[in-house]
């Protein structure tokens, strides 16, 4: 039920034609008292719902505390072309275990705008998707990453414009 209907017992109407002639009557202490009681009920129900939601989120939430010289993982989702980072402490994960997974900072060339460019190594495959009126050519591109190589399907036209040396 909408809060307005809970308070007033009817749907909310626009200000145009708010009162009709047969509805007009004096408001005494009784309707005001009823409205205040409904307000109290709604506030109690909202508090109940908020505390329930808070208890759900508190179970999953954990405080992040890092000390100086702690090793952390920075979670980054790789995308084609240029990658942009927006930093927040919630994307840091404490390193537990295998130190071989740590990427040396010197190998990542991040510029002032906190971006870096992925470098394509080669095209591995070509696929043409036929639609009703046109054909879309895609190529499977092998990207050079910091520790492993990754492949994605990209539009052939865009790849020819950006990296013509791959098609020579």
Image (cartoon, rainbow, N blue to C red):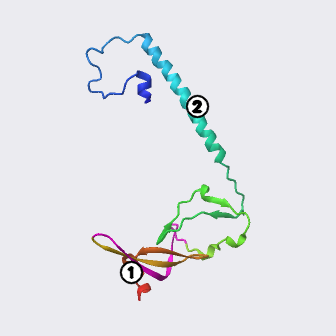
Where in the figure is residue 90, as x and y percent of width and height? 61, 55
Give left or right: position of 21 versus 164: left
Which residue occupies 59% across, 63% down?
75
Give left or right: position of 50 versus 153: right
Residue at the spot of label 2? 48
In-front residue for pair 66/140: 140
Quarter of the image with the C terminus is: bottom left
Which residue occupies 65% across, 64% down?
73
State which quadrant residue 71 falls in.
Answer: bottom right
Q: Is residue 6 magenta?
A: no
Which residue occupies 35% across, 11% down?
26
Quick one: which residue is furthest to the right in this view?
97
Where in the figure is residue 55, as x and y percent of width and height? 63, 39
Report how far apart the C-alphas of labels 1 and 2 lie in the structure. Answer: 59 Å
State which quadrant residue 57 falls in.
Answer: top right
Give the main secondary structure, helix, strand or loop, of the magenta stretch.
Answer: strand
Classify 122 as above or below 68: below
Q: Which residues are magenta?
A: 110-132
Label 2 Cα neighbours within 10 Å, binned few <14 / some 14-19 / many ≥20 = few
Where in the figure is residue 76, as x and y percent of width and height? 56, 65
Which residue occupies 72% across, 69% down?
98
Classify 65 as above or below 15: below
Which sits earlier in the primary sequence, circle 1 or circle 2? 2
Classify 163 as above or below 56: below
Residue at the spot of label 1? 160
Q: Is residue 121 magenta?
A: yes
Label 1 Cα neighbours within 10 Å, binned few <14 / some 14-19 / many ≥20 = few
């Amino acid at each position: 039920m909408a809060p307005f209907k809970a308070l007033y017992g009817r749907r909310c109407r626009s200000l145009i034609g708010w009162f009709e002639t047969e509805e007009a009557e004096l408001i005494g202490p009784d309707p005001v008292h009823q409205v205040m009681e409904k307000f109290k009920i709604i506030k109690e129900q909202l508090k109940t719902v908020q505390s329930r939601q808070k208890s759900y989120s508190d179970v999953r939430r954990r405080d992040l505390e890092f000390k100086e010289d702690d090793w952390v993982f920075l979670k980054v989702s790789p995308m084609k072309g240029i990658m942009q980072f927006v930093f927040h402490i919630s994307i840091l994960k404490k390193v537990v275990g295998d130190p071989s997974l740590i990427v040396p900072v010197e190998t990542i060339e991040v510029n002032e705008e906190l971006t870096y460019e992925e470098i394509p190594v080669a095209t591995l495959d070509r696929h043409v998707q036929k639609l009703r009126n046109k054909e879309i050519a895609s190529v499977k591109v092998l990207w050079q990453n910091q520790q492993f190589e990754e492949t994605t399907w990209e539009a052939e036209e865009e790849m020819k414009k950006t990296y013509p040396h791959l098609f020579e």
